[in-house]
Amino acid sequence: MPTLSQKAASMPASPIRKLVPYADTAKARGIYVYHLNIGQPDISSPQIALDAVKNNTLKLVEYSHSAGILSFRKKLMEYYHKYQIEVSADEIIVTNGGSEGIMFAFMACLNPGDEVLVTEPFYANYNGFAIYTGAVVKPIRAKIENGFALPPIEEFEKHITSKTKAILVCNPNNPTGYLYSREELELLATIVKKHNLFLFSDEVYREFCYDNEKYHSVMDLKGIEENVVLLDSVSKRYSACGCRVGVFITKNKELYNAAMKFAQARLSPPTYGQIFSEAAIDTSQEYFDEVVREYTLRRNTVVEAINKMDGCFCPNPKGAFYAVARLPIDNADRFCQWLLEDFSYENKTVMLAPATGFYSTEGAGANEVRISYVLNVDDLLASMKCLEEALKVYPERTV
């Protein structure tokens, strides 16, 4: 057999999905599995968007413009205006999911060997996107003790070299749920301006902010307008992960034109996904108010339960629908696999994502897991009971 590429060998397995075979085997044994490993909401998508797809009158599903359907891009302008993000239709490229938008940013801005600074833990697929392009992720460690707040600016300065080309943030954050303040973002802006870096900002969870905390966008930072790329998605906002529609936005015309070459190479984003997404912009505020109330309740359920467990600690996230918890375990990968292979409580178990996959520093996150609180409260209570009982009998418990 011919030798596979170095990129294939370097591509990491998803910490979110790599344990799926063990979950499937557990289910085949009759074990009920609570899936807290993946950010797949169980909340219904907006009916207005579902109806737009169901009732459309297309006679031919043709390619759209490579930048996306113009009426959708114009509607997005209205949506972003509500968040004080002022953009025009010709600054927006609709992408095949938020993932493609990140890849466009990496491919248009980064050469092989260029470095992008990312606070860790970070969304695991950032590593994969870097491998696609030959770029190098340079992690800057955030700490669970202070809820994964932005590390001191001095830490960023320490990591900047002649190869540094960009900083990537996720706000609100996946996997930690941390919500960056305007002051933290302005500190980042000073570094971006000082070193003439790109600032990529993944802001797909902006609707999900709790405790009256406010979301701020990098698009509202002054003096670095040409450096910023906003990355977005409809997957989480409208509980529509299978829609596969994202957005790449920049005011930098040279960068926009470069990204458009990649957009043209893949032809166009999905037509039905865009139909859904355009209609979804008219979703009522009541829908989001109810979703935020529900996620607040779910967050409280998970965080309070974990912090009552002996030897466990979980910061209280202010956004998204994830939490990272520190458990009395020595190896998160082994523990998460053990939950599926060897443990059950009342014929049930829980599937978590080992946090090791959200770090690129060797050995980091070994006693942490990411929890997606995307199930209803009753299921979350039951899953937390499973976790509590599991920790009582885990053979390699550390405390």
Image (cartoon, rainbow, N blue to C red):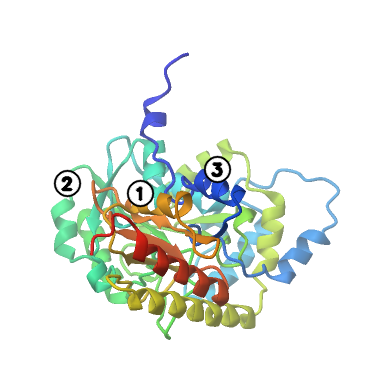
Name the residue type under label 1.
Answer: Arg
Callout 2: helix, strand or loop? loop
Callout 1: helix, strand or loop? helix
Q: Which residue is mark 3?
A: 263
Given residues 363 and 124, the one toward you in this image is: 363
Q: Position of residue 54 (x, y in %)?
A: 81, 60
Q: Quadrant of the C terminus?
A: bottom left
Q: Residue furthest top?
A: 1
- Left or right position of 270 against 87: right
Mark 1 closeness class: few <14, some 14–19, many ≥20 residues within 10 Å: few
What's the residue at 61%, 81% (across, down)?
Answer: 285
Callout 3: helix, strand or loop? helix
Given residues 310 and 67, the one toward you in this image is: 310
Q: Position of residue 330 (x, y in %)?
A: 26, 54
Residue 209 visible within the image? no
Mark 2 closeness class: few <14, some 14–19, many ≥20 residues within 10 Å: few
Of the numbered discs 1 and 3, the one sitting upstream in the chain is 3
Which quadrant would residue 72 be assigned to in this image? bottom right
Name the residue type under label 2.
Answer: Thr
Name the residue type under label 3.
Answer: Ala
Given residues 281 and 335, the one toward you in this image is: 335
What's the residue at 55%, 64% (across, down)?
Answer: 236
What's the residue at 63%, 79% (across, down)?
Answer: 287
Q: Which residue is mark 1?
A: 334
Which quadrant would residue 252 be assigned to in this image? bottom left
Of the numbered discs 3 and 2, the one sitting upstream in the chain is 2
Q: Which residue is mark 2?
A: 161
* Residues at marks 2 and 1, CA–CA distance in whole angstroms: 36 Å
97 above or below 107?
Answer: below
120 above or below 382?
Answer: above
Q: Nearer the viewer, mark 1 or mark 3?
A: 1
216 above or below 40?
Answer: below
